[in-house]
Image: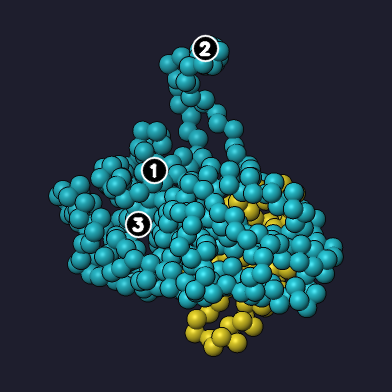
Chain colours: A cyan, B yellow
Amino acid sequence: MAKIKVVHYINQFFAQIGGEEKADYPAELRVGEIIGPGTAFESAFGDEAEIVATIVCGDSYFNENIDKAKADILEMVKSQKPDLFIAGPAFNAGRYGVACGTITDAVLNELGIPALTGMYEENPGVDMFASKLYIVSTKNSAAGMRAAVKKMAPLALKLARHEKIGASVVEGYIPTGVRVNFFEKERGAKRAVDMLLKKLSDKPFVTEYPMPDFDRVAPNPAVKDMAHAKIALVTSGGIVPKGNPDHIESSSASHYGEYCLDGVEALSSETYETAHGGYDPVYANDDPNRVLPVDVLRQLEKEGVIGKLHDKYYSTVGNGTAVASAKAFAAEYAQKLLEDHVDAVILTST
Amino acid sequence: MVKEIERAGIPVVHVCTVTPISMTVGANRIVPAIAIPHPLGNPNLDHEEEFKLRRKLVEKALKALETEVDGQTVFEG
């Protein structure tokens, strides 16, 4: 039997083109090349499949030009007539996850070619695409590459051969929400009582029907009187006083910073910088107002468009930071904002 | 973070470039920004032009805060 032909999609980082400074790298087709994680897939495939081409695209380029990037990449995939498409894995890289999800979805649903990607459960790409795709669950960093390939390669081959795909717990993908009927050995009443007994004795148990988690917060009423409103700035873009006095981590931040804006008319490259390690810092370091627009808000304050710019701002790094951490940071500083009678918040993200 | 600020009862606008992420995160007022590494700026413009661009975006964010919404809303254009 002929080998399964695979096209592999990776970002600029895994293609060893560069880090954030190369994140605007446009989509590029490399026929006959096996790059980075592709070599791990190639060896996992053995004689079953081969990577015939690798498509490389910068994460910022993809996310900022999503329609064009998608269309260009679809053409590249089509030109190779593959039997299978693999993107990533993206681990916990947010923009990479969105790119992998978007392109895998397009290849699967627009070209009808079996396709698979992989990412960490908190990657925003999971929320966006888990119901439409097979996304293999990976660790949160590239240290989990070997484990990820070990799960992705066999599932990918199954998809390419149009074999029956088992349950998510068996195959290792993130649940798609599709339910399949089957017969359990034990009847329902017994399973329920077993679960209850475990729960009563504080032992771990697995529910058979997880409740959906619709954590949505209704919007608050609009600001009625902007000319007298106190506006606060918050950012996940990592803008901190020069030298990063609180040592906010460049990725997976463990805390946030509270900084005084009293007497600060505008941010400057001499006094502020970004601690964020997930985007090219050149522009933010050159002019931090590009992320935290203090200069404009001061002008609007003087003109009476807003009542006052709150004299403290809150900053953290949203790069690979756990959702639970971000939630805890914001729950805490939101109380401070309330105590300080802040009327509204502008939150900027990179 | 947007959601926790909203939950505390403070209206909040999320200014960001990748608006689909903001949608999944659950922001209610969303204003699309310029680019990932410089959401409220454009290094290709001269300083004055760039300031004007930033002011326009901030004004749009304030407008969003002054607008009643009944669900997730992206303030385009």
Name the one closer to the observer, A204 or A55.
A204
Q: Is residue A327 above or below residue A350?
A: above
- Give the CA distance from mark 1 to mark 3: 13 Å
Residue pointed to by mark 2: A201
Residue pointed to by mark 1: A137
- A245 horizontally vs A153: left or right: right
Quadrant of the rendered structure where residue A234 is? bottom right
How crowded is the residue under tag 1: few (<14 C-alpha within 10 Å), some, or many (20+)?
Answer: many
Quadrant of the rendered structure where residue A110 is? bottom left
- Give the CA distance from mark 3 to mark 2: 44 Å
Position of residue B23 measured from the top left corner of the image (x, y, whole percent): 60, 56
Position of residue A203 measured from the top left corner of the image (x, y, whole percent): 48, 16
Q: Is residue A238 above or below residue B39?
A: above
- Could you tell me the amino acid type at mark 1? Ser
- Could you tell me the amino acid type at mark 2? Ser
Mark nearest the camera among 3 and 2 is 2
Q: Residue at x 75, y 73 (%)?
A: A301
Query: Are marks 1 and 3 in one subunit?
Result: yes
Q: Residue at x 55, y 48 (%)?
A: A326
- Looking at the rendered structure, the secondary structure element under dot 3 is strand
- A192 horizontally vs A133: left or right: right
Position of residue B64 measured from the top left corner of the image (x, y, whole percent): 73, 66
- Could you tell me the amino acid type at mark 3? Ala
Residue pointed to by mark 3: A87
Q: Residue at x 41, y 36 (%)?
A: A168
Upstream in sequence: badge 1 or badge 3 = 3
Upstream in sequence: badge 3 or badge 2 = 3
